Amino acid sequence: MLRYIASRFLLWIPSVILVMLGVYALAFYGAGDPIKLIFLRAPGDVAYDPVRIEAIRETAGLNRPFIEQFISYLLNLAHGNFGNSLSSGRSVWAIISAAAPVSMSLGLCAIVLTAVVAIPLGMIAALNQNTRIDYTILGSALFLWAIPPYVAGPLLMVGLLVLLPNVPVPYGWGGIFDARIILPLIVLSFQPIALIVRQTRAAVIEVLSEDFVRTARAKGVPETIVAIKHILRPVLTPVVTQLGLIMITIVNGAIFVELVFGLPGLGRLTVSALTDSDYPVILAITLIGSFLVMLSNLLVDVLYPLLDPRAADTMKSR
Amino acid sequence: MATIPMTPAELDEPKTSLWRDAWYRLVRNKLAIFGLFVIVVLAFAAAFGPYLTPYDFLSQDLNARNASPSLAHLFGTDDLGRDVFSRVIYGTRTAFVVAIVVTAIAVTIGVALGAMAGFFGGWFDRIIMWLTDVTMSVPNLLLVVVINASLKAPLAGWMEAQYLATLNPFFRETIWVDFILVFGSMALISWPPYARLVRAQVLSIRSRPYITAARALGLTTRIILLRYVVPNAVGPLIVSVSAGLGTAMVLESAFSFLGVGVNPPTPSWGNMISDGLRVWQHYPHLLAAPAAVLGLATVGFSFLGDGLNDALNPRGSK
């Protein structure tokens, strides 16, 4: 298993280098000269002195060819050096490590909330297939899926203010045990919940027609035990495989949720880095995002044989 | 020599076809018909927008700023006194143009690469599949936002230089810069799912018993391809195209919301929502109108996609 994980990680490295190359090229050819960007942003009247700029460029190694610069960037990365932000001059690593815990804890809570809410709801819908309960759950899921987080967030905020006028506006960050996390968490979980409800429902309906379910029922096993022992486990496999997709949904959603609710996480950092053309920060965020998606896909592959022993054999033969 | 009965008439069977069966199944599905209805209405509004809008989307009436919905202005007016109804209809135009062009590009690339990968196999297959892995392993929103943010200024500059050099009015329209970038970057992240789908279809259909049977009957490759391979491969593709159109619309509005998509004054649901967010406490209709239409469009495409899936893959559904 360890060898499998290591090989997956090694396979990820070339793909992430390709992505970084793309973003680096965009920064290099698209955004223009970083030194010029720094000068344009400098406070007060810093003279745009071509001679001085040439000198800075020489010392920073920015007059080398593209590939050479990219390779030296990668070597720095390998040493854990993410470079410095263009807009604040602070180390990118410091900026990222200040913002990442916010997004990570929010995202993890959203995943837990999704699992806790969506899997039971999907099961209930499937066990009551084509009844009013089923249509209500499925309809709500479709509804939630259709509302982008940048619409759901403000609307819920208005709703809260109208219903509970004495509650302070949920804006800002105070850790996961702060009441202000509730609303962003709900908004961030909407689309993943919708996804998993539909996935679970479809999976349960498929499992319901399996022989072992009929056998269990014929034996007189109580319906709740059938649901938990016989149906839930095979259903978890197709649901868990959606983790990568959920990760992408959450990473995308976090950009909007953090913007709307004023959370100092990676999502808001992304937007501010983009408005400032702060490429060292953007590159680092791209790296982290890609790493997260890779990690969740890897987790799926590792969890799969544990959940479904039938898949373990094919794993071994790989 | 006695001929083998080949056509339905000769076989004495009721006249039917894959498409007719699928159509009957689709019409019976109320949700799918609702989705189709929504899409047809929106497509009509998009196609004939200029003849339907009561006002020009740019015409300002500063005496009627932020007016609530009324008979004169169905969805009210915005902060410049522009008619929100007309702007939403023009936004529908933007959404459809982006969704259709992006999906068309993505499907073309995806089908071509996927079919070739499935057909040729070997190293070509491996490279294509690796590329889809790479593209799908980066949070897609992030990638598109980075591309748009970094290429917008250089491309606009290039257009301006072209205009000054050639005086061709085509180059003066900065709107093309937005559209080219949005089309290109969104197509870049949208093609991998199509490629994978088509490749998997080609691989699985190639080894199906009915293909072997058709070969054994001595049918020509052309007939096998047209009558057996294409109809069976195209069903899942139609389903995913329907879903892809909805996704593209949501993505487009997300980019406009973040300010990297289609720029004002060109109306887009995303930038209308973003504008509406600033004043929703006072003028909720400015947020509600574009958000509701966007939600409706998403629900429509998702209902239709589900219905098409059930209609075209009868074995997969109950």
Image (spheres, coloured by chain):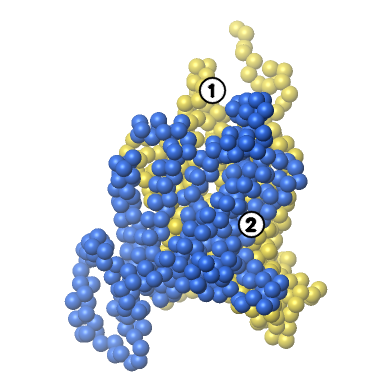
What's the amino acid at mark 2?
Answer: Leu
Write down the residue under mark 1: B210
Which subunit holds the residue at mark 1? Answer: B
Which subunit holds the residue at mark 2? Answer: A
Along the line of sight, the residue nearer the viewer: B104 or A88? A88
Q: Image check: B233 left or right of B123?
A: right
Farthest bottom residue in view: A45
Along the line of sight, the residue nearer the viewer: A131 or B121? A131
Residue at the spot 39% in from the left edge and 71% down from the top edge: A98
As drawn, the chain in yellow is B
Circle 2 Cα neighbour tier, 10 Å, few/some/many (<14 / 14–19 / ≥20): many
Write down the residue under mark 2: A144
The image shows residue A309, relative to residue B91, as above or below, that is above
Residue at the spot 67% in from the left edge and 44% down from the top edge: A124
Mark whose residue sits in front, 2 or 1: 2
In the rendering, at what x and y percent does residue A251 appear?
A: 48, 60
Q: Quadrant of the N terminus of chain A?
A: top left
Along the line of sight, the residue nearer the viewer: B229 or A52? A52
Residue at the spot 20% in from the left edge and 69% down from the top edge: A64
